[in-house]
């Protein structure tokens, strides 16, 4: 191993080589834990004293962290615990939840419509009262006490409610997808163990539990039930 | 390895990898479901999902192929949608932080899109799939040394790009502050 110093545009003031190998490539493999034990130890000791190499390692870890963040934005909504052993491929059917949050959705829609009418009325009364006010009508809507109260107590909560409703619907959809997968995997299980009564009974019970959960989510359970073979 | 053991151990990584390739949560769900169903089918036919075959590599190969098939079917363009970007933005951050994070997400995706396919693929299998270099080599049907080089080049490129984005952001904020 040789050790020499250079500027390298201020990024790395150290350049190590092992038989012509690029140190930065080694550092990348080091980050992945893919070096032989002796080389790993060697780099580990080296980066304690070499600021440039430590910085490079940190940069590579930053890249991985950023990618992790990007990839972890959305996850399965809950852990899937089904065991799978055998089966055949099945086409996954799109599940929808017709009753994701009907009452809140209905309420939000009607309330927003009413709010829209009130906002328009407030806007009209404010803007047509004089020509000068017309020129700066939008700003006035938010400075006048009525509008402020209206925005704070009506528009903002309604917006939040609509947003929460969307989030809720997405979560429910994900749960339904997970359950659908579990049911399909269980169905795969049953195909090759028809001679083992105990296992069939156990799986039947699991299917029942899952169906119950699906029923709680809406009418999806009824449609899925038709696809589960009788055991 | 039985699929029963493979499923809890690798489903998250497989999903992340599929999400990376397809760019869509729901497509990733579909790809992973299909991949496990394919493995189950293989196992039921007595094909090798056994100890000598590498089950993780096999799973990720299927996920990869399924993702590419799906993309080919849909002919989906790789542009960034606002819906997919605004998920990580927390309401607890102020507007400038949210804007900065938004910019960084878009920049990162653009930087990834500029990488050669093999580099991006190797890095995603490493970061999302948490596969070893040997497993990645099996999935990508190349040598271990190629995998090591591709991952290194991808990291170096992305690291330089991220540094560039951050310094751009810093200079923009400085200009705004001076105004």
Image (cartoon, rainbow, N blue to C red):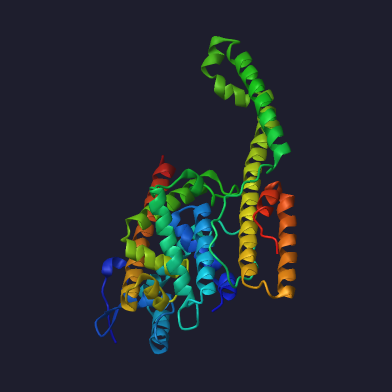
Q: Position of residue B84 (x, y in %)?
A: 49, 48
Residue at screen point 58% across, 71% down: A86
Left-right relation of A128 to A219: left
Q: Which residue appears farthest toward the bottom when viewing the image?
A: A38
Percent of width and height locating residue A53: 36, 75
User: Where, by quadrant of the figure, is residue B40 drawn?
Assistant: bottom right
In this orientation, which residue lies closer to the viewer: A128 or A12?
A128
Front residue of this view, candidates A17 and A218: A218
The residue at 32%/59% (across/down) is: B115
Q: Total marks drawn?
A: 0
| Residue A24 left/right relative to A129 | left
Figure check: A182 above or below B71? below
Task: From this view, report whether residue B171 is shown above or below residue A139.
Answer: below
Compared across the picture, whether B157 is left or right of A69 comes to left
Query: Camera-side residue: A23 or B124?
Result: B124
Quadrant for the C terminus of chain A in the image: bottom right
At which x and y percent is residue A24? 32, 74
Q: Can see residue A63?
A: no
Q: Position of residue A10 (x, y in %)?
A: 30, 67
Residue farthest front in this picture: A195
The quadrant of the rendering that contains the N terminus of chain A is: bottom left
Is residue B140 visible from the viewing direction of this image? yes
């Amino acid at each position: 191993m040789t050790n020499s110093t250079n500027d390298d545009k201020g990024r790395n003031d150290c350049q190590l080589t092992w038989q012509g190998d690029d140190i930065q490539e080694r550092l990348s493999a080091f980050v992945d834990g893919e070096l032989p034990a002796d080389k790993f130890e060697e780099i580990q000791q080296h980066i304690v004293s070499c600021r440039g190499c430590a910085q490079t390692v940190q940069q590579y870890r930053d890249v991985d962290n950023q990618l992790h963040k990007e990839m972890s934005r959305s996850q399965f909504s809950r852990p899937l615990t089904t065991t799978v052993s055998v089966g055949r491929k099945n086409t996954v059917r799109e599940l929808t939840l017709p009753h994701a949050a009907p009452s809140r959705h209905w309420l939000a829609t009607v309330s927003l419509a009413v709010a829209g009418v009130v906002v328009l009325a407030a806007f009209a009364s404010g803007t047509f009262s004089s020509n000068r006010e017309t020129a700066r009508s939008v700003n006035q809507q938010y400075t006048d006490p009525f509008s402020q109260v209206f925005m704070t107590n009506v528009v903002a909560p309604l917006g939040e409610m609509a947003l929460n409703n969307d989030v809720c619907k997405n979560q429910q959809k994900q749960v339904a997808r997970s359950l659908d997968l579990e049911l399909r995997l269980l169905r795969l299980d049953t195909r090759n163990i028809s001679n083992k009564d105990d296992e069939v009974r156990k799986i039947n019970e699991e299917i029942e539990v899952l169906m119950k959960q699906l029923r709680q989510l809406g009418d999806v359970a009824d449609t899925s039930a038709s696809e589960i073979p009788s055991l | 390895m039985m699929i029963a053991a493979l499923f809890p151990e690798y489903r998250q990584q497989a999903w992340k990898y599929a999400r990376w390739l397809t760019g869509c949560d729901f497509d990733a769900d579909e790809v992973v479901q299909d991949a496990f169903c394919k493995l189950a089918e293989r196992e039921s036919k007595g094909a090798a999902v056994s100890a000598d075959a590498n089950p993780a590599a096999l799973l990720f190969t299927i996920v990869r192929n399924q993702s590419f098939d799906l993309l080919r079917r849909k002919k989906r363009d790789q542009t960034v949608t606002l819906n997919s970007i605004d998920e990580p933005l927390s309401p607890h951050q102020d507007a400038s932080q949210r804007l900065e994070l938004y910019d960084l997400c878009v920049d990162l995706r653009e930087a990834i899109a500029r990488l050669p396919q093999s580099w991006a693929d190797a890095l995603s299998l490493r970061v999302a799939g948490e596969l070893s270099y040997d497993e990645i080599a099996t999935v990508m049907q190349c040598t271990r040394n190629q995998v090591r080089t591709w991952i290194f080049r991808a990291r170096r490129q992305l690291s330089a790009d991220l540094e560039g984005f951050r310094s751009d952001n810093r200079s923009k904020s400085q200009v705004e502050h001076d105004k």
